Image: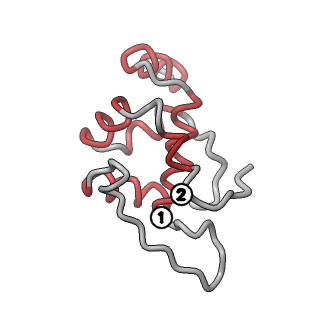
Amino acid sequence: MTNNNKAVQIQNLTGLSEGHFADLIRLTQLIFDPTGGLPHKTVDVDWKMLGIPKGVVNNLWMLGKKYQYSSPYIPIDVVWEQLTPESRNWMMENKRNLWKLEEYFPARDED
């Protein structure tokens, strides 16, 4: 199966769009660095209070580290493969709110 077919299959099975995955990558970047790269600034975030369980935060932190300086438009199948089952479920349950979580943080120059 080609990557494009995998991406389409993931979208059909989950109801997630490319936009949801881009929102997730932007969120992973914020989880990895909540300051948005601002020097000499520290931000302590209670992710659980924002509705993100610790296991999901750990998985998304690793993705944020990997894609810290990337465009948020990473192929769906590439992102999906790196999500734990817990993160996949959380993403599907929270797909409509991913972009809202970004609003709590400083704007990033992402693309």
The image quadrant of residue 14 is: top left
Q: Residue furthest bottom?
A: 40
The vertical placement of 74 against 93, above or below, is below
Q: Is residue 79 above or below residue 2?
A: below
Classify the position of the N terminus by image quarter.
top left
Q: Nearer the viewer, residue 39 or 45?
A: 45
Q: Nearer the viewer, residue 93 or 46?
A: 46
| Residue at point 64%, 54% (across, down) | 70
Give x and y (percent) for residue 27. 51, 50
The residue carrying mark 1 is 32
The residue depicted at 74 percent of the width and 49 percent of the height is 111
Tag 2: amino acid: Gln
On screen, residue 60 above or below 34: above
Q: CA distance from mark 2 to mark 1?
A: 5 Å
- Pointer 2 and pointer 1: residues touching (CB < 8 Å)? yes
Mark 1: amino acid: Phe
- 53 to the left or right of 33: left
Q: Which mark is residue 29?
A: 2
Q: Residue at x 46, y 40 (%)?
A: 79
Residue at disc 2, secondary structure: helix
